[in-house]
Image: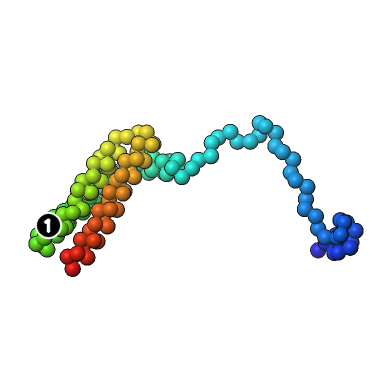
Amino acid sequence: MTADSFPGSGAAPGGGVQAPPPPAPEPAGTSPAGPVLGFRELSERVIASVADRYPWLNRVLMGMLAVFTGTCVVAVVARLSPLPLIPVPLFVVAAYALWRAHGVTARRQLFNWVLLFALATMVGFWLISVVGRWVE
């Protein structure tokens, strides 16, 4: 506690603590000139760095999509119903997006193909869960 924080200490009219003076404005040339990056730019950077750092990831993900599709085909035989084939077209779309993303060097296009891959895969899994509930 300081002496001017007591009421009536005389440091400020009416006593109490006053706010510090506002900072002086910065000169025109000292502020950063770069643009502020948003969520999409950050996502593009992360996806591009992962694609550069792990070139084998594309083959692993393609193999996983093949396993998911094979599981759906086996489920048709096991359940004696064509319902497990519903998510297969989405897995084919995801595989196409992953194949197209493999040769892309531009960050924006890579982001778009990876986003399509992720959405198609997630919706395919969601359909697997829906079909699982229908068949129960």
Residue in the picture at 26% in, 56% down: 125
Relative horizontal placement of residue 5, taking residue 106 as reference (left or right): right
| Quadrant of the image occupied by residue 34 | top right
In the rendered image of this protein, does residue 36 appear above or below residue 19?
above
| Residue 128 position within the rendered picture, expressed as x and y whole percent measured from the top left | 22, 58
Relative horizontal placement of residue 11, taking residue 43 as reference (left or right): right
Q: Which image quarter is the N terminus in?
A: bottom right
- Comparing 80 with 59, the one in front is 80
Q: Which image quarter is the C terminus in?
A: bottom left
| Residue 36 position within the rendered picture, expressed as x and y whole percent measured from the top left | 53, 39
| Quadrant of the image occupied by residue 55 | top left
| Residue 11 position within the rendered picture, expressed as x and y whole percent measured from the top left | 88, 56
Residue that lies at the very extreme toward the top in this rendered image: 29
Disc 1: which residue: 82
Relative horizontal placement of residue 126, taking residue 81 as reference (left or right): right
Residue in the picture at 29% in, 35% down: 103
Residue that lies at the very extreme toward the right in this rendered image: 10
Local SS, label 1: loop
In the rendered image of this protein, does residue 87 appear above or below residue 113?
below
Specify the color scheme.
rainbow
Residue in the picture at 38% in, 43% down: 47
| Residue 28 position within the rendered picture, expressed as x and y whole percent measured from the top left | 67, 32
Relative horizontal placement of residue 125, taking residue 71 as reference (left or right): right
